[in-house]
Amino acid sequence: MRVGYLGPPGTFSEEALSRCDLAGGAERRDYPSIADTFEAVAKGEVDCGLLPIENSLEGSVSATLDLLVHRPGLRIRREVLLPIRQNLLARPGVAFGDVKRVLSIPIAAAQCQAFLRARLPGVPLEPALSTAEAARLAAERPDAAAVASRAAAERYGLALLAEDIQDGEGNTTRFVLVAREDERPTGRDRTSIAFTLDRDRPGGLYDVLGVFAQRHINLSKIESRPSKQALGHYVFFIDFEGHRSEAAGAEAIAGVLERVHALHLLGSYPRG
């Protein structure tokens, strides 16, 4: 099995991948962005790909949600929950006063806003495609620091200026494994869907939520994203407990389909 992930080596995605129960010692391939990882699966370069989808401090990863909806054909096959411990890394010998820029993927830096404001006020953030890419770049720049993992520090020969700089103790990122097919029922599953509503019908979202309430199906997530079609038009995302092929889940999906403009089935998979 070939598995893609957001690289380079040393990212939290690589760490999360090590927690996936993949048979046969999968061949790992790293890609420079979330979109590149997704496209590698879609084109058949790899059999599946691991993508970050949600963080407990900063919310959803919009790039992943948008790809699942606007590039249909892949489904979520598994989820992995990874506790995230962010660190400030720099070349050995670099002190706080030497740092003139902070490198990281924006969602990682956002998890550390309080620390960065307190210890590096006014220092600009330069975005990178991943935390490990930020660490690699920091290893080349004596005036830079990176927000990244301990694994990235070890891989790129960086020192830890500060440890555990995230804003919350419960910082956790949810990753999803995407493939062409989702998983069979396990008895402990979650299903993700996305849908759009007819713009001029009042109570449309209320009617959709009622489908789940009437069947006593628990929702673990509901949110919206711009549809990219018009201002004020949204895609709604729902995660619910159960599998799409089981009676309750299948009935709920059929009920939702009757009440929405378009429905995207994003996958059924074991809960992490």
Image (cartoon, rainbow, N blue to C red):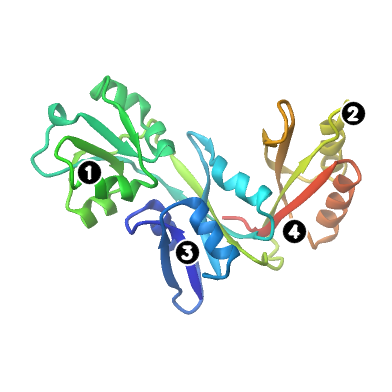
Q: Name the residue: 69% across, 55% down.
A: 72
Sequence-wise, the earlier of marks 3 and 2 is 3
Residue shown at 67% from the left, 36% from the top: 228
Q: Residues within 10 Å of mark 1 (few under 14, many from 20)?
A: many
Asked whether residue 19 is in view, the answer is: no
Residue 77 percent location from the top left of the image: 62, 62
Tag 3 and tag 2, C-beta contact below 8 Å? no
- Please state which of residues 101 and 94 is positioned toward the viewer in this rendering: 101
Residue that appears at 61% across and 49% down? 67
- Quote the CA–CA distance across marks 4 and 2: 29 Å
In the rendered structure, which amino acid carries the disc numbered 4? His
Mark closer to the observer (4, 2): 2
Q: CA distance from mark 1 to mark 3?
A: 24 Å
Q: Earlier in the sequence, mark 1 or mark 3?
A: 3
Q: Is residue 123 visible?
A: yes
Q: Picture coordinates of residue 36 (x, y %)?
A: 49, 56
| Residue occupied by mark 3 | 4
Work out whether mark 4 precedes mark 2 in sequence or the reverse, and give the earlier one. Answer: 2
Find out whether the residues at labels 1 and 3 contact each other: C-beta distance under 8 Å.
no
Number of the label disc, if any, that sits on residue 201? 2
Residue at the spot of label 1: 138
Q: Residue at x 21, y 36 (%)?
A: 144
Query: SS class of the residue under badge 4?
Result: loop
Labelled disc at residue 73:
none
Check if mark 4's residue and mark 1's residue have beta carbons within 8 Å: no
- Against 24, residue 195 (above or below) is above
Q: How many angstroms separate mark 4 from mark 3 (CA)?
A: 25 Å
Q: Quadrant of residue 97?
A: top left
Residue 182 vs 125, above or below: the answer is below
Q: What is the spatial separation of the Cα atoms under label 3 and label 2, in whole angstroms?
A: 41 Å
What is the CA distance from the residue labelled 1 to the residue labelled 2?
52 Å
Residue corresponding to mark 4: 243
